[in-house]
Image (spheres, rainbow, N blue to C red):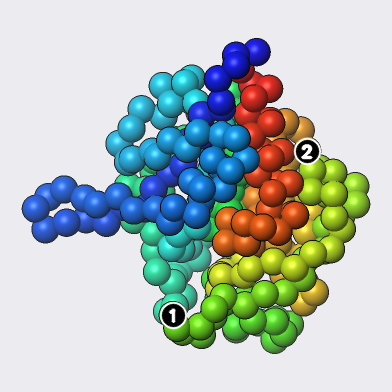
Amino acid sequence: MSSRKPLIGISCNWRAESNGFGELRMDDAYARAVSRAGGVPVLIPTDADAEALADSLDGLLIPGGADIDPREFGEEPHPTVRIVARPRYEMECALLKAFEARRKPILGICYGAQLLNVWRGGTLYQHLPDLPSVTLPHQRKSEEQEPPRHFVQLKRDSRLYTLIGQEQFEIVSAHHQAVREVGSGLRIVAHAPDGIVEGIEDPDLPFFIGVQWHPERDPNAPATQALFKAFIQAAERTR
C-alpha cells in the first residue's frame, strides 16, 4: 500500500459562457470534508478522460447539483425541475462506468445519490411537495433560510450503519427530489421519518453509497466524520 494520501475525484458543476467556453463551479465544503478525512480532493472538469482518471484516482465523490433530466428515466419534466448541465451529467456517467468497473469507492451526495440510482435504472420522485405522505421540510423555502434539519434512520444490517455506527441521527436536508424505484443491485438502507429514502448502497461492491442528505454541511457531526473517514479508508485499500 502506498504511503501517499488517497486522491479523491470530485465532479464539478458546469455553466456555459457566451464566449463558447464554460465555467466550473463546486461548493468547497465537499473538498474540505475530503481533506479533513485525510484525502486529497481533485476537481474533475467536463470532457476529461474518465478511464485515465479511474486509473489514477482512488475514489470518486459526486456532489450535489441540479436535477437529472427525467427523460433519463422515462418521464417528462415537472415544472419545478432545473436540469443539470448536460456536459456534467455525461462526464459523471462516464466516471461511474469507469470507477465501478475497477470497484473503486464511489460516494454520491444528494444529486449524487439520485444519480447513482438513475445510473442503475432507478427512478425519482420529481417534486416531493406534491406527495401527500411528505410531512417534513426537505428543502428550504428561500435562499435566506437555513436548510432544514430532520432525523434519518439507518437499517442495522446495512454497510452504511456499520460505517457510521449510529442508527438514528440528525442531518442537514436540501432537496426536492428523492429515490422512488430503486436501481438494479441497490438496496435502500436509510429513511426519513416520513418515509423518504435517505440512503442507498450496493452490498456487492466495496463502497458504492449514496446519501440524500448533506453531510459536508455539518462537518462537526460524528456521522459526517465517520462517513468521510470510511470513504477515505476504502480509497486507501484500492491502492
Query: For residue 188, what is the image quadrant?
Result: bottom right
Disc 2 marks which amino acid?
Answer: Pro
Closer to the camera in the image, 168 or 108: 168
Pointer 1: what residue?
Answer: 143
Q: Which residue is at a point 60% across and 35% down the rendered structure image?
A: 38
Closer to the camera in the image, 111 or 30: 30
Q: Which residue is at a point 69% across and 31% down the rendered structure image?
A: 233
Quadrant of the drawing holding the N terminus = top right
Quadrant of the drawing holding the C terminus = top right
Residue 168 position within the rendered picture, expressed as x and y whole percent measured from the top left: 84, 63
Q: Which residue is at a point 50% across and 33% down the rendered structure image?
A: 40
Between circles 2 and 1, the one closer to the viewer is: 1
Q: Is residue 52 above or below residue 28?
A: above
Q: Tell me the distance, in whole angstroms, between the alpha carbons under discs 2 and 1.
A: 37 Å
Residue 182 position within the rendered picture, expressed as x and y whole percent measured from the top left: 69, 54
Q: Which residue is at a point 43% across and 26% down the rendered structure image?
A: 53
Q: Is residue 134 above or below residue 224?
A: below
Q: Is residue 121 left or right of residue 223?
A: left
Most extreme residue toward the top, as rendered? 1
Disc 1 marks which amino acid?
Answer: Glu
Pointer 2: what residue?
Answer: 203
- What is the secondary structure assignment of the residue under circle 1? loop
Q: Is residue 118 visible?
A: no
